[in-house]
Structure formats: structure tokens, C-alpha cells
Image: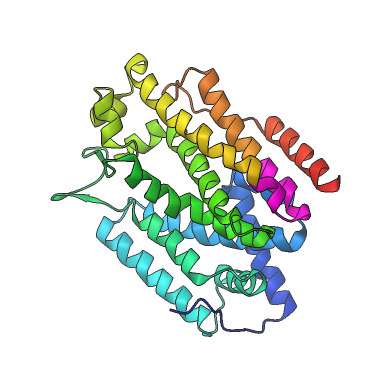
């Protein structure tokens, strides 16, 4: 379908209410991401909140274990079709759809990028033979890092490509840099969430890496042999560090009023990776996180970068 969004007229109060609903979703659900939002001017913060609310709803459908994988796929497709109808001019009272369409029009965000976000969410809806993926049937869907990269691209790099359209950027190669920073973020999430993902039957570590260290999916599910698992996680962390280098090149390419927001996001996620390393890759006994005070301190420095 066309990337163009049909122009729609909404009363300013309707849009304010719609964006307010999206901000509420982002504030309550985006534990790390929202700090970057707060360093943006209001209109850009609203646009990112709308994108996040859209992503959050797709994730919620995908993660709803109370219904079958088949039904989740159906609901995801049905919901995306409803959004396409709105993009093509059909009226809506859905606040997320309303706000996102306005953000697309304002910042020239292609619908194809949002479709890729939903496609990435659908990549988690996997069957293994006659069984659905779950705690009783853990499964890695990625044989190689190249396959995992494609997943990271859809669920994280595409977010980066949407973000820089809202931030504003000066050079076309900023898109490749944003893609690589997105991969760094997702690899950090994968390392941090190994225990929680395994409990849902989702193993994101490529099979070739497991084989390299003589590990199995069941080793990650059990999480009891930290010494054997540590080199595997260190490999993923080293990959993430290489991709984080792209952030240094990307920062000067975004608009001045958005540079502080990007710096805040990168610093929070990079600090999270550093914290995992400091704990010797022990992600099984306690969830690794930054405190609110730490993230607030980073945000304050991000604000200062925006002002200078």
C-alpha cells in the first residue's frame, strides 16, 4: 500500500486527548524509553508517545498467552488492517490510531515502517511442530546471528528509523547508524531478559552460538550453570558494544533539539549493558536494572545537552 497518509482533520481538543492517552501508555509502560521522550520538545514527545502506544498494543496482542498463537496472529492482522483503513481516510475514535496518523502526517513517517514493527512482533508467534512455543516447548527460532539480526531489525532498528524521522536528521547515512543502534538496544534486552524469555519458551540466542559453547536451550531455561553460560552472554555483549559505536556517529546528525533525547536513550541502554557486565553476566538470580535516580540523573544531563 502507499506510504501516504490521507489528510484527516481533527478538532485540536480531540488530538490533545488522543496524544494524552498515548503519553499515559508510554509513561506507564516504557520504563527506560520514556526518559528519552522527556528530553524532547512537546510535539516530538507526543509523536514518539503515539508510536510507542502503537508498538505496545501490538506487543500486548502477541504476548497474550490466554489465547492460542493462531488467534493472536489473527488479532494482530485484524488490528493492523483496521489501522490501514484509518491511514486511508476512514474515521476513527481510537486515540492511538488518531494520534499516530497525525504524527505520521507531521513527520512524514512511512506506513511501511509501522508495518515492519508489527511484522517483528509477529515473529514471536512461533509453532514448533504440533506444539506452540511455551515453557514446556522452549525453542530458538534463529540458527545464525544473521537471522537474529533480521529479528532485531524488525523489532528495534525500525523503531530507530521511526525515531530519527521525528528527531530530524541531516545525512542519509544516519539511517544505517540508527539501524545499528537499534540492534545494540535489542541485544542488550536479549541478554538482560534471558531468564524471562526462556520462561515463555522464547530463546533468542542463535543456535550456532549455543553449539559453539556446547550449550542447549534447556541450559538457558534452567539457568543454573552460570559459569558455562557466561561466555555465551559475553559474546552477545561484545556484539552489542560494536553496534553502540554507531551512536557516537549518529548523535551529531540529529536536530539539536533532539540530540539530548537520543543521548539519554543511548546512555541508559549502554549503562544497562555495563551493569550486566559488572554483575559478571548474572541475569538469572536478579533482574538487572537502573534505579529511577540513575535514569533521572541521565535525563538531567540529557536536558543540559539540549540547552547548550
Please tell me which residue is depicted at 44% across the width and 66% down the height of the picture. Answer: 115
Image spot of residue 71 (x, y percent): 28, 62
Between residue 59 and residue 257, name the one nearer to us: 257
Between residue 32 and residue 233, name the one nearer to us: 233
User: Does residue 287 appear anywhere in the picture?
Assistant: yes
Please tell me which residue is depicted at 58% across the width and 68% down the height of the picture. Answer: 109
- Which residue is outermost to the right? 308
Please tell me which residue is depicted at 59% across the width and 73% down the height of the picture. Answer: 101
Q: Is residue 167 above or below residue 278?
A: below
Image spot of residue 2 (x, y percent): 47, 79
Q: Is residue 246 above or below residue 168?
A: above
Quadrant of the drawing holding the N terminus: bottom left
| Boundaries of the magenta span | 250-264
Q: Main secondary structure of the magenta part?
A: helix
Instruction: Give the quadrant of residue 7.
Output: bottom right
Left or right? Give the position of 142 relative to 33.
left
Image spot of residue 111 (x, y percent): 50, 71
Left or right? Give the position of 215 relative to 233.
left
Between residue 63 and residue 192, name the one nearer to us: 192
Q: Is residue 210 above or below residue 132?
A: above
Q: Is residue 93 above or below residue 242?
A: below
Residue 260 in the magenta stretch? The answer is: yes
Amino acid at each position: 500500500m502507499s506510504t501516504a497518509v490521507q489528510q484527516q482533520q481533527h478538532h485540536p481538543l480531540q488530538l490533545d486527548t488522543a496524544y494524552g492517552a498515548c503519553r499515559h501508555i508510554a509513561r506507564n509502560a516504557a520504563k527506560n524509553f520514556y526518559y528519552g521522550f522527556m528530553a524532547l520538545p512537546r510535539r516530538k514527545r507526543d509523536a514518539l508517545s503515539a508510536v510507542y502506544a502503537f508498538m505496545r498494543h501490538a506487543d500486548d496482542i502477541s504476548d497474550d498467552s490466554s489465547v492460542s498463537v493462531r488467534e493472536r496472529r489473527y488479532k494482530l492482522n485484524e488490528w493492523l488492517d483496521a489501522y490501514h483503513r484509518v491511514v486511508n481516510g476512514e474515521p476513527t475514535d481510537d486515540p492511538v490510531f488518531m494520534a499516530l496518523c497525525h504524527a505520521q502526517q507531521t513527520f512524514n513517517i512511512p506506513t511501511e515502517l509501522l508495518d515492519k514493527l508489527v511484522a517483528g512482533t509477529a515473529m514471536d508467534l512461533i509453532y514448533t511442530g504440533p506444539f506452540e512455543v511455551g515453557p514446556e516447548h522452549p525453542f530458538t527460532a534463529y540458527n545464525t546471528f544473521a537471522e537474529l539480526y533480521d529479528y532485531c531489525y524488525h523489532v528495534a532498528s525500525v523503531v530507530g528509523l521511526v525515531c530519527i524521522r521525528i528527531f530530524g536528521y541531516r545525512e542519509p547515512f544516519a539511517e544505517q547508524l540508527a539501524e545499528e543502534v537499534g540492534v545494540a538496544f535489542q541485544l542488550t534486552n536479549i541478554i538482560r531478559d534471558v531468564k524471562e524469555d526462556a520462561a515463555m519458551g522464547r530463546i533468542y540466542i542463535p543456535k550456532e552460538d549455543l553449539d559453539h559453547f556446547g550449550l542447549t536451550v534447556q541450559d538457558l531455561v534452567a539457568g543454573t550453570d552460570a559459569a558455562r553460560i557466561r561466555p555465551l552472554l559475553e559474546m552477545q555483549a561484545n556484539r552489542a558494544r560494536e553496534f553502540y559505536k554507531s551512536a557516537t556517529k549518529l548523535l551529531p546528525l540529529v536536530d539539536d533539539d533532539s540530540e539530548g533525547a537520543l543521548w539519554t536513550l543511548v546512555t541508559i541502554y549502554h549503562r544497562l549493558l555495563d551493569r550486566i557486565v559488572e554483575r559478571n553476566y548474572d541475569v538469572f538470580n536478579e533482574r538487572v536494572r537502573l534505579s529511577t535516580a540513575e535514569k533521572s540523573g541521565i535525563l538531567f544531563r540529557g536536558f543540559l545537552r539540549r540547552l547548550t
